Image (cartoon, rainbow, N blue to C red):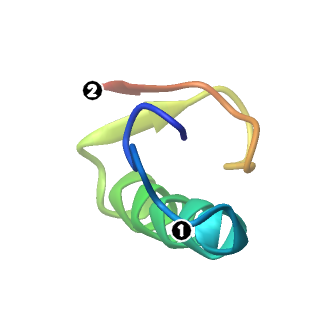
Amino acid sequence: MRAIYVGLDRRLVKAAGLSVFAHLEDLVARGPVATDGEPSIEGRYRLR
């Protein structure tokens, strides 16, 4: 997460991480991104 949001106020890091996770969940549901098992905040993701 730090690599994505360089310089972000640390109080906002959790919210930013949840935002990224929500986008990943959507991409998994629509198909262009895959993960092993159910999407999770600590999962690993890859393009299909």
Mark 2, mark 1: which one is toward the viewer? Answer: 1
Q: Is residue 33 above or below residue 16?
A: above
Q: Residues within 10 Å of mark 1 (few under 14, many from 20)?
A: some
Is 32 left or right of 3, judged from the image as shown?
A: left
**Residue shown at 52% from the left, 71% from the top:** 22
Percent position (x, y) of residue 28? 43, 52
Percent position (x, y) of residue 45? 49, 29
**Residue shown at 43% from the left, 62% from the top:** 29
The residue pinned by badge 2 equals 47
Of residues 48 and 9, the one drawn nearer to the viewer in this rendering: 9
Q: Is residue 42 above or below residue 14?
A: above
Is 11 left or right of 7, judged from the image as shown?
A: right
In the picture, which quadrant includes the N terminus?
top right
Of residues 39 and 12, the one drawn nearer to the viewer in this rendering: 12
Of residues 8 and 39, the one drawn nearer to the viewer in this rendering: 8
In the structure shown, which secondary structural element does the residue marked by tag 2 occupy? Answer: strand
Percent position (x, y) of residue 4? 37, 42
Q: Tell me how far mark 2 sits from mark 1, CA to CA.
A: 21 Å
**Residue shown at 69% from the left, 33% from the top:** 43
Of residues 15 and 35, the one drawn nearer to the viewer in this rendering: 15
- The numbered disc on residue 4 is none
Q: Residues within 10 Å of mark 2 (few under 14, many from 20)?
A: few
The residue pinned by badge 1 equals 16
Three-letter amino acid code of the residue under disc 1:
Ala
Is 32 left or right of 25, judged from the image as shown?
A: left
Percent position (x, y) of residue 8? 47, 60
In the structure shown, which secondary structural element does the residue marked by tag 1 occupy? Answer: helix
- For marks 2 and 1 on the same chain, the one whose residue lies earlier in the sequence: 1
